[in-house]
Image (cartoon, rainbow, N blue to C red):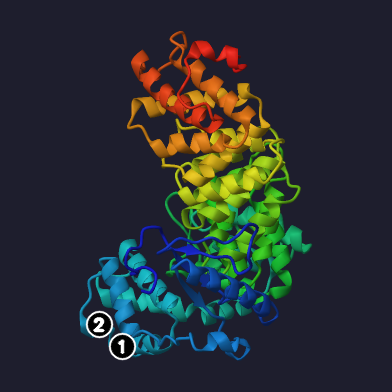
Amino acid sequence: MLLEEAPAAVRPVEELPPTGEEGPFEVSADDRYLLDLSSVTDAEYRAAERTLVQYRSVVEQGDARMVVVLPAGLGWMLHEDLSSLVVTLGRPRGRNVFGRHLRARDVPFDAGDLDTEELRHLFDSAPMRELARLAELVAEARDSRRYGSTFLTWCAEAVAAATNWSDEVARQLRDHRGAHQRALLLAAAMAGGAPAEAALRGAQLLLEVLRHETDGPIGLARADLGEQLTDLGIERNDDGRIVFPRLEYDSAVRRHFWTNFPDLRLAFRDWVARCIDMPELRADGRMNLIARFAEQAMATGCPDHVCSLVEAWTRQQNGRFRAEAAAVLELGLSHERYGSFFRSRVYVWATGRISPELAHVLTDVCRQVIAATHPEQAAVRLRHLALRHTGTEREAARTALLDLARADRRVFRRLTDRIISLPLADGADDLLLGLLDPVPLRIVPPYKEFALGWRALLMTKPAAEWTPLLHRWLDVLSRGTLDHRIVGSLIVAAAGDYGALNRLYVAVCQWRSPGLPTAPGAAHIPPETRQRVGELLCREIDVLLGMGAAHSDAEAPERGEGP
């Protein structure tokens, strides 16, 4: 409410990193920020609080707005200057929250349907996310058409799925202690919706990873696959695909294994890495598998396991599992608790030595995921990727970075400031030229940074490199409303340097020349328009050179300004 309903809000809410990143933190009036410290540990809190104090100072000076979520139980560590700002939020009414989620999913119900003992207990104790999940399960039960046709039957199955299956799974594992049976149960839960053969192959791979000897009969002496699945309460539909008859039972199976076999979590990670290559899995099956793995890894506090798979799948040079690596990383970046962890990991990767495939994956998630909610953080990571790599991965990062900066004035400003602080070499000059190109630009550039960028070009690069860019700007100014602030920024960029002003004058004279061809596909610019716009710039340059009125083009060579 404090952020989403803020008056005069224009830009979306931006989440800040718990630890400051490179470059100054700058705000504008009415900007809105969220700083989520809820997952910060005792050891990390002091550093996070120092960052909070820095953010707070800048936000107050810039007349912006920031909301901070503090870690539960660490109030005793809060600095006394901040304690007066703390507001404790009470728990919403669970019944109302659940009802709103049901209505959002178009699930019909009567008020009396919510007066069961089990629901009342959940309303009083369950976290809001679990009530949202329960409503989602009710909608799934309705849509499956397997659990009756009334809200009461849907809700009963959903409540059972949310609360009862853990004990049922534990009982099932007590009844099936064989390694092969348990491996098949877990493999089926991970590959639900895939062909039954995928579960069998997955079970075999899990036994290999765990180095289990085959238990029980082998070959033809073993029960067939259908009998094995039936014994575990698993069905196959008409297409031969795995189906658990009870709602969300497969999720309870996955949760049980990851929760109750903590010493095997690394093995489960390695197993999933091998399963992804199974020919029995198609693209949708692979995506389901990695989504289920990521869910359990993060639920058990093991986000590093997700990162390990991203690295493993991007070591291959053929890019075979690039989509899977990007998908699992997107799940981490979108996670409520670990999103900031994965953004920090992307930064570490982007600033280090990584494989070209990983660079491509990072570019994709920066452009499609991080930029949607954290555009400035996405730009920082893309800049490192664009300047540290070569080949196609460099070009992809450069394109993504420029697309982002050309549509966001703040990103444009921050990127320009950063580039001009670097030597204009090793790709930085190419970035600056692309950033200052008017053709793909979708914003009015910040005039100060626009002038600083042009100054860097005029002072460090040969005229031949920036003259075509200047001509494109003059074309744009001639075809639309003449923006005198852009003209002034171009002039200011060369102010104080006689040589730069001369080079700018020559470039403008070239553009005014009647013989200059029109760019392919561009509308023709009448000669009188060229003369009018060129005359304006030349007159301003002459004033800075102390020469008063503008000179004609014919006089330029006599002044040493010819090409």
Does the image show residue 463? yes
Residue 468, picture quadrant: top right
Mark 1 residue type: Thr
In this view, the residue in front, 61 or 309, is 61
Q: Position of residue 36 (x, y in %)?
A: 53, 72
Q: In the rendered image of this protein, does residue 558 appear above or below residue 257? A: above
Q: Position of residue 453 (x, y in %)?
A: 57, 40
Residue 262, picture quadrant: bottom right
Give the quarter of the figure containing the C terminus: top right
Instruction: List the residue tagged with mark 2.
Output: 113
Mark-to-mark CA distance, 2 and 1: 7 Å
Numbered circle sitting on residue 173: none
Residue for point 55% across, 59% down: 333
* Element marked by disc 1: loop
In the drawing, does residue 462 fall left or right of residue 554?
A: right
Residue for point 55% across, 34% down: 434
Q: In the rendered image of this protein, does residue 187 appear above or below residue 393? A: below
Residue for point 54% across, 65% down: 16
Instruction: List the residue tagged with mark 1.
Output: 116
